[in-house]
Amino acid sequence: MGLGVGDFDTDGALDILKTHFSDDTPGLYRNTGKGIFRDATYRAGLAVETRYVAWGAGIVDLDNDGLPDLFMATGMVYPEVERAIPDVPYKSPRLLYRNLGGGRFEQLLDEAGPGIAECHCSRGVAFGDFDNDGDIDILIMNMNAPPSLLRNDIRGANHWLKVLLAGKQSNRSAIGAQVIATYGGRRQAQAVLAQSSYLSANDRRLHFGLGDAKGAELEIHWPSGAVEKLGHVDGDRMVVIEEGSGVREERRFSPSREAAKYR
């Protein structure tokens, strides 16, 4: 159905989340870093939910604690099935799993807010910070209905860092680049992708939750083959990095003022 690409165990290697049909578990595959992926689905605790058909998916840090969470949109394919089998609804809620660390997750239901519990027949999902308040929001495409824009209103003192890459020898949008952020004893990898989730495209600004860390060291693997390393980069801002030139620009956001525009 859909794929999420990210680093759920913050070991510096990209993992894969794969959604499936109902009565089957999603697939969470841990990258060993040597071209081998191991099935981590049951150990992660994802086998608790198999009722829904899942589509768009993401491995994204929704609470900025430095541990990427898992999100999936759901929706049945055939609306007539519900009339014959009430336990197979056409519209269903979204699925959110909070990262507990150590490769384990817990499913959030009512705790995640009405936007997660609301039932739709959904397909594509895109992730990005549309209100520039320092957290990841979610845009969901619903069948025969308006899309859902879920604004993240997370509170707390966790820090974050956004990275926008500009290629020079590589393509200008840096599609195919990979950034590894080191912070608080963790190494989290993210990739700049032209397509994500299911028939969707994420915000091209890579967003790293940093937890208690106030900044991160960055290692950038450009599509050209060049590798660039930057020392400590302060968090709670976006940095624009040009290939071969380091940080070209820094932008500070005002979360309270930006978020107020959408309240």
Image (cartoon, grey):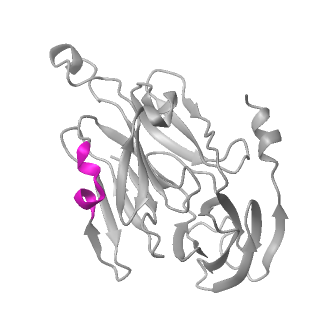
The quadrant of the image that shows the C terminus is top right
Q: Position of residue 158 (x, y in %)?
A: 64, 57
- Res 61 seen here: yes
Residue 59: percent from left, percent from top: 46, 56
Quadrant of res 180: bottom right
Prevalent SS, magenta region: helix
From what the image shows, is residue 59 above or below residue 94? Answer: below
Percent x, y of residue 103: 35, 64
Residue 245 image offset from top left, x and y in percent: 79, 81
Question: Foreground residue, 80 or 28?
Answer: 28
**Residue visible at 46% across and 40% down?**
124
In the picture, measured across the screen, residue 18 lies left or right of residue 222, that is: left
* Residue at far top of view: 83
Decide whether residue 43 is among the magenta residues: yes
In the image, taking residue 233 as reference, residue 154 lies left or right, namely: left
Residue 128 in the image: above or below residue 53: below
Residue at 64% x, 49% y is: 156
Answer left or right for 198 relative to 254: left
The quarter of the displayed image where residue 77 is located: top left
> For residue 239, what is the image quadrant?
bottom right
**Residue situated in front as seen by the camera: 30 or 53:** 30
| Total numbered labels | 0
Q: Is residue 81 above or below residue 117?
A: above
Question: Range of the magenta residues?
Answer: 40-48
Question: Going by the picture, which residue comes out furthest to the left?
Answer: 84
Q: Is residue 171 magenta?
A: no
Any part of residue 205 in sight: no
Residue at image coords 77%, 46%: 255
Q: Nearer the viewer, residue 48 or 143?
A: 48
Query: What residue is shown at x 43% (from left), y 63% (from top)?
Result: 8
Relative vertical location of residue 197 with respect to residue 41 in this rendering, above or below: above
